[in-house]
Structure formats: C-alpha cells, structure tokens
Amino acid sequence: MNVPVCTERIPHVRESRQRECRTSSLMFQSSPPCVRLLPSSLSPPPRCPIDFESGWDQTAWPIYAPDCNQGGKVSLDSTTAHSGKNSIRVDGAGGYCGHVFFGTNKVPSGDFYVRTYLKASKALTSSHVSFITMPDPAQGTNKHLRIGGQNSILMYNRESDDATLPDLSPQGVAASTALPTGSWQCFEYHVGSDGSIETWLNGQAIAGLTSIPGQSNPNAGQWQRSSIKPKPSAVYFGWESYGGDTNTFWYDDIVISSSRVGCSGGTNPPASTTLVTSVTPGPSSTATSLAPATSTTSSGCAAAQWSQCGGIGFNGCTTCASPYTCKFSNDYYSQCL
C-alpha cells in the first residue's frame, strides 16, 4: 500500500532528517512502519528514527514500571541529545523498586531489530542491572528478556531461569565489552524468530552477546541450555537495579524495525560489521576492568532482595537482608531471594 511519509512541514525536524524522509510514498512489504512521535495524521516510513523533537507522547510511549516504582523518573531533556535538541532521560534509583522504563508495544511480530543511541552517566559495575527490558510471553507470564550489565560488562538475562548471555565466567566476561560513559553510543540488537540473538555496539558485533542456532558459542552454555525462543511483545528503555546501583541514562534516535538499520542513519542498512571477539574497554569517565575480581567475603553489609550475593569473581555483600536468603544459581551467580 502507498503510505504518506515525512514532509518538510513537520515541525522541529532537522534538514538532514527531512532529506531522509522526503519521499512521497513507500511500498510496505513485511516491515511495519517505525513508530515516531509525529502528529497522528502522518504515517512515517520504516526506519524513520524517533527523535523526540516534537516532544514525548506519553500515550504512544508510556512509562512502564511493573510491580512497583520508588524513586525512578522519566523526563524529556532538552539539555542533551544525540541529534536535535531533545532526548529522553531516565533517572534510575537503587533497588528493584527503583526501576522505571518507557517504551512501546508496537514491535514486529517476527524478527525485529532495535537501534538506539544511549548515554550512561556511570559505568556498569559488578552488580546486575538492566537498561532495556522486553516482556516475553515465550518465557511465561510476566517474564522478561533483559539487556543490561553485570561484572562491568554488557549482558542479556532471561528472567525465567536467570540465564545470562554470555556466561559470567572469565572467558564469557572477556567476550563482551564495557559500556562507555558520558558520551552517546550506538546500541543495536536483533531478536530472531528462530531464537537468535545478535548485538552491536557502535557498529561492531559483540561475540559474547551472540547466540545463533546451529552456531557454536563457547560462552553461551547457560543461554543455549533452554529451548525457549524469545518472542518479546514490547520494548522498554530505562533502568532496573537488583542491588543498590543508581544511574542516569539518556535515549535518542530510536528505530524498531524488521530489518537492521545500523548507526549511520534511519534509511539505509549497514554495509558491513566487524565481529568483536575480544575487547579492551575504551576510555570512559569511570575506569572499569574486564578482569574478574578475586572472590572475597564482605562483612558488615546485607544485600537487598534481587541483589547478587555470591559467585566466582564477586566481591560484594554475601549476606542477604532478612527475610531473604542467598540462593545459588551457578558458579558465577547467586541471588537474594
């Protein structure tokens, strides 16, 4: 079908973005239109980035904070942006109930790709956190596929069995990468209908965050032990901490599509990618290390519910606050439940 698309009369859209979106009609095939905050009478083309230049439509992009929300905040920020003048700011509080997200349930029903530019104020630590969460009915009711960090590196987490991608072994940690702070990063991922997971940071594929059926990944033992094929029904951006970590994230130029977009814009797919098999973190405002810490026993502290409380390389609190107890998950992760 022919669909009207972005025109030069759209307010607040930069000239470069207008050129990208100036075509008068598009023929949609299997790809649904990307969601973009424009007047409802206009239908954007696929891959047109959501840049928040017209504001934050909280009906199209509502706040998501399942179970509880104590301290988290989402707001439109005109002081920093990847492009234009606006971005969405998420102030994430500590503890599970400090979580807060914003997002959309307008996602493709099959394969889908997400591209967002994001900026973090603090480096990832040894604690488990999430900055993207996706309700995933394939795992069961109220279960999520989560993207975040632990052991100072990027990782996925499957809520139903607490599996991580990569495994949080020294080899798995080395196969992922830290998230730079204080500057905009292009973060992309693909969730395939066949169960595949692919991830890119600034155009580089991350080996530790890749799981493709039929292809060996020595650092995906936990992830591949399950036959679950993720089928997320929505995508939400924000912050969730399973310990005391707090952070501030900004999001801009989001694209949700059934094909990969890449970092260069919103209209052309990436020409090529480089698979990162071993990563040394680049400069950031807070120094991080991919080397596992020596396990120690912390005394005089108690970890909150959902917090990590043990595992090889973990050096935080190993005692849980009452009435919770430290439950073993695997050699590299135990949690207060």
Image (cartoon, rainbow, N blue to C red):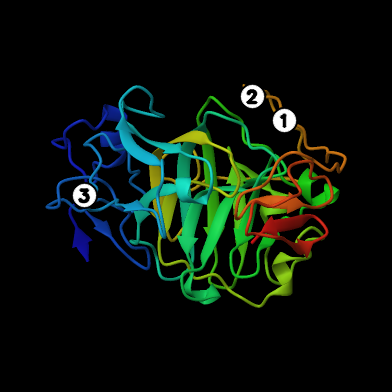
Answer with mark 3 or mark 2, whichever residue precedes in sequence.
3
Residue under label 2: 284
Residue under label 1: 288
Label annotation for residue 5:
3
The residue closer to the viewer here, 19 or 249, is: 249
The three-letter amino acid code for the residue at tag 1 is Thr
The three-letter amino acid code for the residue at tag 2 is Ser
Q: Residue 280's spot in the image, x, y percent?
A: 76, 33
How would you rate the neighbour count of disc 1 (Cα within 10 Å): few for under 14, some for 14-19, many for 20 or more? Answer: many
How would you rate the neighbour count of disc 3 (Cα within 10 Å): few for under 14, some for 14-19, many for 20 or more? Answer: some
Q: Residue at x 41, y 59 (%)?
A: 66
Q: CA distance from mark 1 to mark 2?
A: 8 Å
Q: Disc 1 vs disc 2: Cβ atoms closer than 8 Å?
A: yes
- Residue 155 against residue 323 in the figure, above or below: above
The residue closer to the viewer here, 9 or 253, is: 253
Q: Residue at x 51, y 76 (%)?
A: 140
Disc 1 element: loop
